[in-house]
Amino acid sequence: MLSTVRLESLCATRAYRAALLAAAVIMLLLCNDALAFTFADVVQRAKELAATAYKKDSGVILPKEFQGLTYDRYREIRFKPNESWWRNTKLPFELGFFHQGFNYDQPVKINEVVGGRVREIKFSPGLFDYGDIKIDPHKIQGLAFAGLRIHFPVNTPKYKDDVLTFLGASYFRAVGKGQVYGLWARALAIDTGLISGEEFPRFVEFWIEQPDPNARELTVFGLLDSRRVTGAYRFLLKPGVETVVEVKAQIYLRENVSKLGLAPLTSMFAFGENQRASGEDYRPEVHDSDGLLIQSGTGEWIWRPLTNPKRLLVTSFALNNPVGFGLMQRDRDFDRYEDLEARYDRRPSAWVEPIGKWGAGRVELVQIPSPDETNDNIVAYWVPDTTPPSRKPFDFEYRILWQKDPETRPPQAWVTQTRRGRGYVRNPDQSVGFVVDFEGPALRKLATDARLTVDVTVDTNGEIVEQHVYRNDVTGGWRLILRVKRIDDSKPVEIRAFLKGDANTVSETWSYILPPA
């Protein structure tokens, strides 16, 4: 039997040990919190990179089996769905990966963050099905991934859809419910459309936070690098009917750049209702987007239909603190496209909303000649009036809404189609005809005998030959008939028009660039 003194001593010792253990646990937790990987860690890496000379990562030389692959041959290399990261853990999100090859020969390091700790996801040839491409697995053990895709069930709880992809340079794209992949976004655009040539920064490393079992959001960090810029990025993915990607960035310029493009969107426009196909094609329209939409800080909404010009066409809209801009796909009827494979009718619009005040700058639209739909020939982005100085941090935030139904539109009325051309003319001249249809709540509620006027302006290279507006009895909207003549055929003409009722604006502004003849 223990004496009272020994018992008290033993209890004291146990209490002391318990206190030490508790203190050790607390210190361990504090240390883990201190060591947890955060956005600040990516910022620090970007800052350190900016202080050094740029070094292109050549990586491992690709075996000859993967050099010079065509697009179709590259597509034969498929990631095995059963190897999806996190599949065995029954998490709501899963990861898939892209193999190096084709245009995607640069290595990308990919990590997961578990409990604040970083763990690299290693490349293995066993993760891929190579089809009929003959490989020696031992020769490609040192390769890396080219990019990643993220899966989440947005269409049915029984299947995890591909909802966000990072692949090539700083490109990424997302989809929501009922959508198929279309246009791309980029982290940054450098000197786009300039004679000096464009620079394409690329993501060299990603970190993906392992989600909770009931998570409906996923965080991805990215490290950007190129000759003149480095950057830290955080992407917060929110999949759904309208998938949202919130972007937080801090960039550093190694050197000055001529043009810095924020929140760039890259799309394709081959032909459409305002520009017929150059050759025979059973499809009436072929495009990922059919217009640029802008909501200015003053409340004006601007719609510019896209074109496939015969030579490079760069235009811009000067704004202060824009509310949003995006490349939109307004034509949603299948019979506008008649393409069962591409399904352009299901491709998303991408609407950019700045978080915070972006100040003065311009939304710039670059339209590049393209012989067919295989080239992304449309780019839109924000250019701030003030470019950040070298080696100093530049912060900005925004969100991209990947939309189909519903889509961002003005509250009153909007353009539903722009048709270029004229019907029968007894005495033809050199003018160009347009038929522009407007629809929306502000027009539907008008009395049948209501009268509207149209405000049309052209720049100094244009002359208005004809203009009138009347109700469209078929749609319940209103139709603008317009004919414009170029003064100098070698130069473009900029046209603006909007509907007015009782001196009040009742529609967005239709803004069109008529390219040189």
Image (spheres, helix red, strand yellow):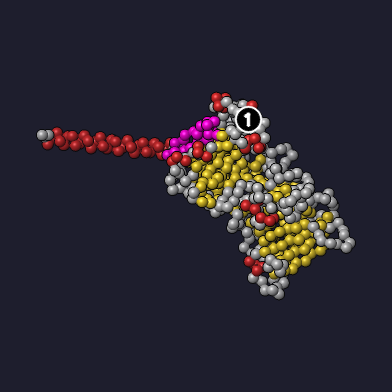
Horizontal relation, residue 452 to residue 16: left or right: right
Q: Residue furthest front?
A: 132
Residue at 56%, 29% in the rendered image: 143
Query: Which of the 4 image quarters holds residue 72?
Result: top right
Q: Give above or below for 297 relative to 441.
A: above
**Does the segment drawn in magenta span residue 55?**
no
Residue closest to the eye, 380 or 342: 342
Q: Is residue 423 visible?
A: yes
Is the residue 349 above or below the residue 34 in the image? below
Residue 43: percent from left, percent from top: 53, 38
Give the x, y percent position of residue 161: 54, 46
Q: Nearer the viewer, residue 219 or 122?
A: 122
State the residue at coordinates (53%, 34%): 127
Asked where in the image residue 11 lies, by quadrant, the reply is top left
Q: Which quarter of the picture shows residue 304?
A: bottom right
Q: Nearer the viewer, residue 418 or 55?
A: 418
291 shown above or below 93: below
The residue indicated by pointer 1 is 66
Disc 1 marks a residue whose amino acid type is: Phe
Is residue 112 in the magenta section?
Answer: yes
Q: Quadrant of the N terminus?
A: top left
Left or right placement of residue 427 versus residue 263 in this view: right
Q: Which residue sits at x=85%, y=62%?
A: 425
Q: x, y percentage for residue 312?
A: 76, 45
Residue 232 x, y percent position in the rendering: 55, 39
Magenta span of residues:
109-128
Residue 192, above or below 435: above
Q: Residue furthest right?
A: 427
- Mark 1, secondary structure of its residue: helix
Q: Residue at x 30, y 38 (%)?
A: 22
